Amino acid sequence: MKLIVAIIRPEKLQDVLEALFRAEVRGLSISRVQGHGGETERVETYRGTTVKMALHEKIRLEIGVSEPFVRPTVEAILKAARTGEVGDGKIFVLPVEKVYRIRTGEEDEAAVTPVQ
């Protein structure tokens, strides 16, 4: 089992969700986050004052999948989230030691398999 964490541009969220649905990836969590990556710092005017904007709005997706779904999930996100510009984001694939479905007590792969 793996936890896939993707940080993407907010405007690409709908494209990514559609791609994940087509890849039959169902369960995920979404958070709005701010961060700073490889983007160059930009200067903006806020209430008449010039300020350096170091943090950027992003979307964080967290998806727990069994091993056979890792590659299709990553490929769906890569294809749908890519603009080719700096700031497209990152995908992290992390090992998961244990998973429990609270409602049923199912463990591991059974806990990340979509409910029929």
Image: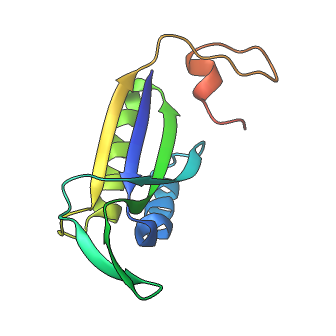
Report how many numbered discs are placed on residues in the image. Answer: 0
**Between 73 and 29, the one nearer to me in the picture:** 29
The x and y percentages for residue 43 are 26, 76
The image quarter containing residue 38 is bottom left
The x and y percentages for residue 86 are 18, 64
- Residue at 51% in and 45% down: 25
- Residue at 50% in and 38% down: 63
The image quarter containing residue 81 is bottom left
- In-image side of 95 versus 88 (left or right): right
Q: 85 above or below 114?
A: below
Which quadrant holds the C terminus? top right
- In-image side of 114 versus 83 (left or right): right
Q: 62 above or below 48?
A: above
- Residue at 18% in and 69% down: 85
Which quadrant holds the N terminus? top left
- Residue at 45% in and 51% down: 23
Q: Residue furthest bottom?
A: 48
Q: How is the image coloured?
A: rainbow
The x and y percentages for residue 35 are 37, 52
